[in-house]
Amino acid sequence: MSKMQLQFRIYMQSLKLPLKVIMAVYLANIIISMAINAVVLKNHDFFSTMGYNTALILLNFILGLLVAIPVVNFNMFNLFLGFGMTRKRYYINMSVFNLLVCFALTLLMTFVYFTLSFMLRSGSKILYVMGFASVDHRLGTIFLFALVCFSVFLVIASLNSLICSVFHSKGGWYGLSALLVALSIPVLFIRQIYDFVVWGGAAALIGTALLAASLGASYLAWRFVSGLEIHT
Amino acid sequence: MNKIVECRMLTKVFDNQAKALDQVNLDIEENRIYGLLGRNGAGKTTLLKLITGQLFPTTGNVSLFGKRPHENEALLGNICFVKENAFYLKSFRDLKVKDVLKMAEAVYPSWDCSFAEQLAVCFRLDVNKKTKSLSKGMLSAAAIIIGLACRAPLTIFDEAYLGLDAVLRQQFYNTLLQDYTENPRTIIFSTHLIEECKGLMDRVVILEEGEILLHEDMDKINEKSFYVAGRRELVEQHLKGKCILHTEEMGRLVRMAIFDSLSDIEQNAMRLDGIEIQPMPLQKLFITLTAGNGGGENEQNAAAV
């Protein structure tokens, strides 16, 4: 077993708990919204309801997971540094796993989103996300959707990694400040983000910009991690 | 002897301005067992973390096998640091103990699998149990098994026995000594249970407030630590020029703790004058050196040592 395999095993192990919690919230969400549809709104179109709910709640589930992963990973730093691993090795492995997770989640999101149209009974029910229509099955559209999803997921994971690295290397107050700064960015551009989520736009440009932002955040996180001290 | 750890003017100041280590110079030689002693907050764990590259020195430098330990993967595989709080092993959560031992096998090139299994039986550790369900004592046992079976050229036990009962602790000391005899390596043993562990120590380092008070071979310590008791004037006359650590007065009688060599001739002369000479246990020496109870005498004497 190599050190990377060792870390991957623990990585998957550590994901179990957040996965269980987020999955439980996800299932509860689906059940409640379906019950409301069936009992309160008297809408018995099961597949349609499930289709809509699945895509939106899946997105929340993915976002929850992307927030949880770096937090869990940074908490395992101590363990691995005590196990003969360097900061660099741990951080590179962690970044590779994060990339793989983002890739897998993108596949999942793309698959669910574009198969929705088959679940919806009536052609009039089209789900629009970031200007993409779930009934548009052209390869170019699917690829662009996947690219934007991937870049959004990656920027969330990278920013979260950066915040965690500040928390662990500089302490709680700096970490909290980094969190506030990270949260203030989407708040500042809330109108543009809303427009993009609803109507879409320059998807390729935004996707590329987000990928560049992820790289920048990952580099900064590495700078903090390289000076990380293990106190516990 | 080869030096495997060299600390030069090593200083560590934390963010809260607390000086944990102050210009420490220390050499650790190959294939010896070091006892690292010190009161709480003396800087023992900080020193060990600096040696293993987990902390960065504020000033000064550490070299391990002649190289800097920071971010040196090849070096880190040769170090096993068993920390005082084995609770970090609980981070493995659902993994069974046997899986954790397999992981250790992946990390340490000189891992002895059969020895690890043997130790698990010896410490009554159920290897099929999940790490999250282990008690404090069993977590310590698991960490100790890793520390012993890894046979790393530099193995550090930082109060690794927490939660272990007296029987298991003795078993640990016996196993450590036996395995060390068969597979010599450098072991640093940080402990508060001085009397229990003194039989293991080859060389002793005493830290106090971030400075090294004593760095001496155990044999030399035994040759130099004495209690001398008798009539005040006679004791003072015989011990003139010797390093006196502590004096207790009982009327006309005194008992002095000294850290200095006494030749057979000197000892015989004292005995003829009715002066009693007793060896001072390591724990008493440690207390005498480090108990800064407000009186400056101990501190001055410690500085003299």
Image (cartoon, grey):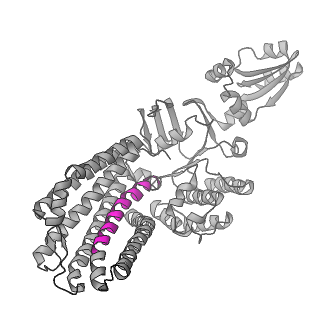
How far across and how far down the image is residue A121, in percent?
22, 87
Residue B27 lies, with reference to residue A88, above or below; the image says above
Residue nearest the viewer, comparing B82 with B89: B89
Dividing the picture into quadrants, the one containing residue A49 is bottom left
Residue located at (21% from left, 49% from top): A188
Label count reads 0
Left or right placement of residue A127 versus residue A87 in this view: left
Residue A143 lies, with reference to residue B253, above or below; the image says below
How far across and how far down the image is residue B100, in percent?
52, 65
Residue A189 lies, with reference to residue A7, above or below; the image says above
Dividing the picture into quadrants, the one containing residue B299 is top right
- Can the viewer see residue B27 in this picture? yes
In magenta stretch: residue B298:
no
Residue nearest the viewer, comparing A47 with A82: A47
What is the magenta segment's predominant secondary structure? helix
Residue located at (39% from left, 41% from top): A173
How far across and how far down the image is residue B45, in percent?
54, 41
Left or right placement of residue A88 versus residue A150 in this view: right
Q: Quadrant of the C terminus of chain B?
A: top right
Residue nearest the viewer, comparing B268 with A110: A110
Residue nearest the viewer, comparing B40 with A163: A163
Residue located at (47% from left, 55% from top): A79
In magenta stretch: residue A56:
yes
Left or right placement of residue B95 versus residue B206 in this view: left
Dividing the picture into quadrants, the one containing residue A68 is bottom left
- Can the viewer see residue B67 in this picture? no
Magenta segment, which residues?
A: A55-78
How far across and how far down the image is residue B118, in percent?
63, 67
